[in-house]
Image (cartoon, rainbow, N blue to C red):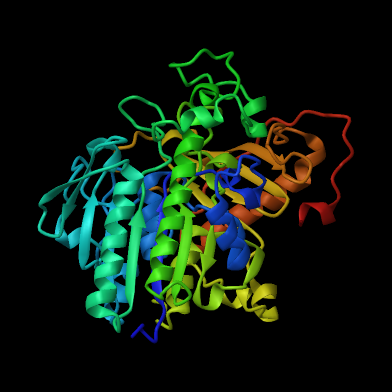
Amino acid sequence: MPSARPNVLVFFTDQQRHDTTGVHGCPLDLTPNFDRLARTGTDVHYSFTCQPVCGPARACLQTGTYATTNGTVTNTHPFNPDLPNLGTCFRDAGYRTGYLGKYHLGPHGVDGPVPRKLRAGYDDWLAANVLEFTSDAYRTRLWDADNQPHDLPGYRADAVTDALIRKLDAQHRNNAAEPFFYFTSYIEPHHQNHVDGYPAPDGYRQRYTGRWCPPDLAALPTHPDATDRPATSVGGNAPAQLDGYFGMVKRLDEALGRVCDALKSLGQLENTVILFTSDHGCHFKTRNGEYKRSGHESSIRVPTLLHGGPFTGGGRVQELVSLVDLPATLLNAAGIEVPETFEGRSILPLVRGDTAAKRDWPDDVYVQISEANWGRAVRTKRWKYITHDPDARSWGSGFTGIHARLVEAELYDLQEDPHELVNLIGWDSHSGVRAVMRERLLNRMQALGEPQPEIIEPEVAPNAQRRVSPDETRA
C-alpha cells in the first residue's frame, strides 16, 4: 500500500544550462521528458543558483542557507553537519532517506568515501565525494554506507540510474507504507576534469556536431584567462565540446524518463514529488578561464521543475526563484516544518496562486560568487548587476567569504540584451540603474548579516544614449 504522505525524489544534475531544455527554447529536442514533466507539473521558469560552483551550491541546497551562513564558501570548505538539512529533516519526520551519486561535501582532498558524520542524515548511501575524480564515462565506482566500493556497469548516468531504480523497487517491496526521500546526484553534464572534455555515450556526440549553438556562445570569444585555447576562438571551447555536452544532456533526460517509468510501474509516480534542478550552468570559458563561477545567465540560470503531489498541473512560476528556496519547498510539500535556520522560502504558495505570496515574493535574486571571480551579483527581471572583489583570495586561504571591497564590474539590460553582450556599467545614461542595483545588493548583504563593503564605482563615460528613467530602474 503506498504511503499516505508524498515521496520526494531529487534528480540533481551538474553544470546544466537552462537553455538545454525545450521549455527554454532549445531546438534540439534534448529533453522531451523534462519538458513533459515541466508542462504537466510546475515549470520554475526563472530559477537560479545562489552559488555557481559545485560544493557551495550543494551545501546551500542541503541546508536551505546561503554559503556565508553554512560556511561552505568554496569547494575546499567542509560541510557543516550541525545545521538542519534536508536529510535530517526528512529522516526525523519518518522518511526513509537515501543518497546516490556525487556528493562533493566531504573533506577536501578525499575523493571517494565520505565519513558518516558528514552524510547529512541520509540512511541509504551509495556515493562518491568527488565523482569526477574517481570515475569516467564508462567507469563508475561508488561507496556504500560501510565505505565499501562498488563498481557499477554501464555509462555513468545509467549506472547511477540503475542503482536508483533498484532502490525504488526494494523500497516498494519491503517498505511501501513508509515514505521515502531519495537524493540522486549526477555528475553529467559536468566536464571530465582529467581530459577537460564532455564524454557523451558512444554515438551521442555525433548527433549534435555542427548543430545549434546558444547565442551567447556564438557571439563571445574565448576569455583571455583560458590559456588552453586561442583567444580568438568563438564560444570559448564550445565549438569543440558542445556536441558532447548536448549528448550528455540527452542521456540524462533518458535517465529521467526511466525513473518516471519505474515510479509509474510501482504506482508511485503521482504520489512522488520530483524536483529536477542543477547546481549551476556552463559558459565554456567565455566569461572567465573555466566553466562557471560568474554572475552571468550561462553560469547561474538552471533548469528546474517540480512534478507530483501538489505540483502536478501547477503551470509556470513566473517569479524569480533561488536554489536556496527549494529545500523549504520540498519540506512544505511533505508537510514537514521548515527549520528557522532556512533562509529561503517555499514556492508552494506561488504554485497555488496565493495572491499575498505573489505580492510579497522578492523581486530579485542574490548570488554569492567564489573562486575564479570573487564577488556578488543581484538580478531582477530586467537588470543584472555584478561586482568583483579586487582583493581576490586563493581558494584554500581560509577565506570566510566576506568582502571588504567590491568593484562595480558589469551591468546588463536583460530585456534588450538577454545574452549579456553589452556591459553598461560605465554608461552615464545608466547611473540611476547602478544606484538602484547597488542599493539592492547592499540590502541583500545586510539581510544575511554580511558586513557592508566599500563599493568602488567605475569610471563613467558620456554617451549618446537617453538617460534611463527612474521607473525603468525599478523593473
Query: Where's residue 68, x and y in %?
Result: 40, 55
- The quarter holding residue 334 reads bottom left
Report the side of 89 relative to 35 (left or right): left
Using the rendered image of the protein, determine whether residue 114 is visible from the camera's viewpoint. Answer: no
Query: Where's residue 139, x and y in %?
Result: 24, 37
User: How many numbered marks are there?
Assistant: 0
Q: Quadrant of the C terminus?
A: bottom right
Report the side of 394 relative to 367 (left or right): left
- Depicted 184 relative to depicted 187: above or below: below
Query: Where's residue 43, x and y in %?
Result: 60, 62
Closer to the camera in the image, 374 or 181? 181
- Depicted 314 relative to depicted 101: above or below: below
Residue at position x 52%, y 39% in the image: 294
- Depicted 383 relative to depicted 443: above or below: above
- Depicted 312 relative to depicted 13: above or below: below
Closer to the camera in the image, 460 or 377? 377
Residue at position x 43%, y 69% in the image: 264
Query: Where's residue 393, x and y in %?
Result: 38, 35
- The quarter holding residue 265 reads bottom left
Using the rendered image of the protein, determine whether residue 453 is visible from the camera's viewpoint. Answer: yes
Closer to the camera in the image, 297 or 150? 150
Outermost residue to the front:
265
Residue at position x 34%, y 57% in the image: 184
Residue at position x 59%, y 78% in the image: 349
Q: Quadrant of the N terminus?
A: bottom left
